[in-house]
Amino acid sequence: MNVIVIVADSFRKDHVGCYGNDWVETPNLDRFATESCLVDGAYADSLYTAPCRTSMMLGRINFPFRPWQPFERDDLPVAEWLWDKGFTSALVTDVYHLHKPGYNYGRGFDERVFIRGQEYDPWILPSQVDEAQIDALYEQHFKPSEVSEKNERFAEMFRQYLRNISVRETEEDYFCAQVCLRAIDWLEAHQGRDNLFLWVDLFDPHEPWDPPLELKEQYNPGYEGMEIIDPVPSQVEGYLTPEEMQNVRALYAGEITFVDRWIGRLLDAARQLGYFDDSMIVFTSDHGEPLDDHGIVRKHRTWMYEELAAVPLILHLPGQAAGERREALVRLSDIAPTICDAAGVEAMPNIHGTSLLPLVRGEVERVRETAITGSFNGGRAIRDERWSLLMPGASEEDELYDRQADPAEQQNVMDEFPHEAWRLECALQRELTELTWE
């Protein structure tokens, strides 16, 4: 059995057609869902980008133990585990945090293909571009926030991104496209082989939200205001006008459709090369993206609301559960043991996750009673099949939501159901106490 994992950073579950969205076009993922098992109830457990990859690759919930950091010497990532079992593997990614100096998320892979240029990767230097042109683009697309202290940092990050895309000429030059094309090259080069493990990690649709022109215009035609493709993480009130915020949502939707287009190219290649017949193929994300659902844009606060914590999860197993749906609480730390199970090897020792294959096959209805989410020294949340308790920490009050009646978590019912909040808080504390990292 071969294994292909596709991760798209900051990809909101509620922006995919197969999860019920009716306005963002995702035809390729929707088709993939008809050939696969759709899991409804997947949540990030350790935020954000690097901790999420740690959780997925180690099978461990790391937010109670570690800040944002690379692997440690004694860590055992799934790629290294499979390498020792005879698998041939590759990591193809443009996620800057996976390959910047000092980070070792490519550990254990036979091949590591890194596409340079995302976010603040110093790929194109100021001396290599016309800085006057960069300044002009900056003025057109970047709006400082008067309600945030992060302007200077994010302004320089955006300038670096503008330098990095200055060499872009065609759609194939976009970072997302380059990752998918290199992944296709690897699949073609290894066609017909067994025991393959390919991890494709896309930074898009992470901001900056800069899809091709036709997709910029698709979801908000006729807009004539400032095109803010990289808003500062901030509260929206006092920063973006309603029209600007609407266009930011449209740009993000365009990114979603663009990523779907190139994932579709990758999936089509996998079909044509025969991988759908002998591979488990996984699509997921590390987390979502706040878009004024609760008054903030981007990841500005430690609230683990649904739009941030929920992730899509589609699992393809040859000849099994095609077009079926599983409503069960799962976590990103379940990815590694699921990979091992599909690969026919035992999971790494001392992990927190569990294989999802029994769930996919319909052998069990659930694998756990709750899903927890958190960040190191930051906010935490716990969800069961009905309720969600959000605990932001610091001086802010906890919030409780009845997700059956309020799936978008808009109406805090803490005062009406304090006993449910107490029950969930006890369950969270009990689980955190039982977690170990050895």
Image (cartoon, rainbow, N blue to C red):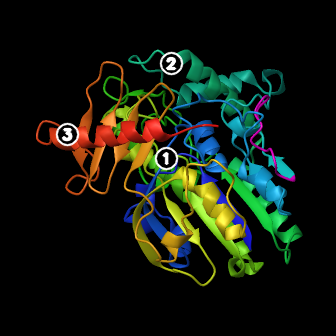
Q: Residues within 10 Å of mark 3 (few under 14, many from 20)?
A: some
Q: Kindly identify which residue carries mark 1.
A: 44
CB within 8 Å, label 2 to label 1: no
Alpha carbon separation for disc pair 2 and 1 = 25 Å
Q: Is residue 280 something one can see in this rendering?
A: yes
The residue singled out by tag 2 in the image is 150
- Element carrying mark 3: loop
Pick out the residue farthest to the bottom.
Answer: 319
Give residue 150's position: percent from left, percent from top: 50, 18
Which quadrant is home to the N terminus? bottom right
Contact flag, marks 3 and 1 (Cβ < 8 Å): no
Q: Which residue is mark 3?
A: 412
- Magenta span: 100-110
List x then y, in percent, for residue 12.
46, 51
Instruction: Say if residue 410 shows up in the picture.
Output: no
Secondary structure predominantly adopted by residues drawn in magenta:
loop
Between discs 3 and 1, the one toward the N terminus: 1
**Element on which disc 1 rests:** loop
Q: What's under tag 3, amino acid-wise?
A: Asn
